[in-house]
Amino acid sequence: AQSVTQLGSHVSVSEGALVLLRCNYSSSVPPYLFWYVQYPNQGLQLLLKYTTGATLVKGINGFEAEFKKSETSFHLTKPSAHMSDAAEYFCAVSDRDTGRRALTFGSGTRLQVQP
Amino acid sequence: DTAVSQTPKYLVTQMGNDKSIKCEQNLGHDTMYWYKQDSKKFLKIMFSYNNKELIINETVPNRFSPKSPDKAHLNLHINSLELGDSAVYFCASSQASHENQPQHFGDGTRLSIL
């Protein structure tokens, strides 16, 4: 079964510092890859996704992620953290061509941004 | 305009009761989902419906019964509530054309069992 690992349940950065949130997936066939953000008491909002083509994908709010097949990774980055980036971030995958469609989520990483 | 709306937002009830959560989407999607988020924030798929047909049932107890009256609605009924059912339940929808379509989530229903 597909699994997603997010290293670091909590990440703390200073405002203006680089944000790096790690995500690795388990399948030998690269799945579709997503990053979602969850603000307190809200639902999940799509940040970005990778399906095919260019391996560096840009999302909303200045985030981007790079798909690296050799490392089975899809790490999320942002050059300069803002206080408003403090939230829970989830990496998720969807199997290719199985018709299953459900997302398998990582355990989440809480991002804290210090002033 | 709320794309995926769930009601109620909060639900506090006693063990043994039966309750329902409603979900509606106005995105014209044909696939809808229920996810459960536990106290450690872990999210897991429960059910998925495509055009009112159940396509995923992830070993969820029989006490949970989804119902899809049309492709814009997916409700969740829970019988004989247990303490372990306390969680946040998220409804989501997507276009079924392909697995690469992102899912759109509601704001969640926070269920607390006393």
Image: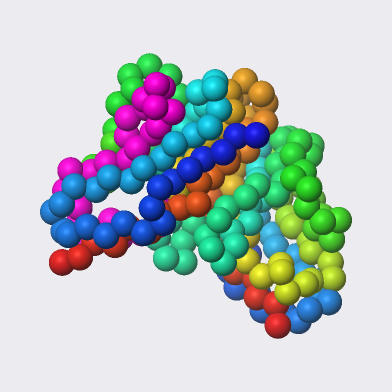
Please say which color scheme the image uses.
rainbow
Q: Quadrant of the C terminus of chain B?
A: bottom right
Q: Is residue A98 left or right of residue A89?
A: right
Q: Horizontal and vertical percent for residue A31?
A: 52, 27
Q: Nearer the viewer, residue B47 or B73?
A: B47
Q: Nearer the viewer, residue B93 or A21?
A: A21
Q: Is residue B47 above or below residue B9?
A: above
Which residue shows up at 45% across the image and 24% down it? A51
Which residue shows up at 29% across the image and 36% down it? A64
Q: Is residue B22 left or right of residue A95?
A: right
Q: Horizontal and vertical percent for residue B27?
A: 55, 41
Q: Is residue A71 magenta?
A: yes
Identity of the residue furthest to the top in this view: A53
Which residue shows up at 28% across the image and 56% down it? A85
Q: Is residue A3 magenta?
A: no
Q: Horizontal and vertical percent for residue A70?
A: 40, 21
Q: Horizontal and vertical percent for residue B34?
A: 66, 50
How many numbered discs sit on the rendered protein?
A: 0
> Residue B86 falls in which quadrant of the image?
bottom right
The stretch in magenta equals A65-89
Question: Can residue A37 be spotted in the picture?
Answer: no
Q: Is residue B55 above or below residue A69?
A: below
Which residue shows up at 50% across the image and 46% down it? A106
> Residue A54 falls in which quadrant of the image?
top left
Q: Is residue B96 above or below residue A97?
A: below
Identity of the residue furthest to the left in this view: A16
Question: Can residue A12 be spotted in the picture?
Answer: yes
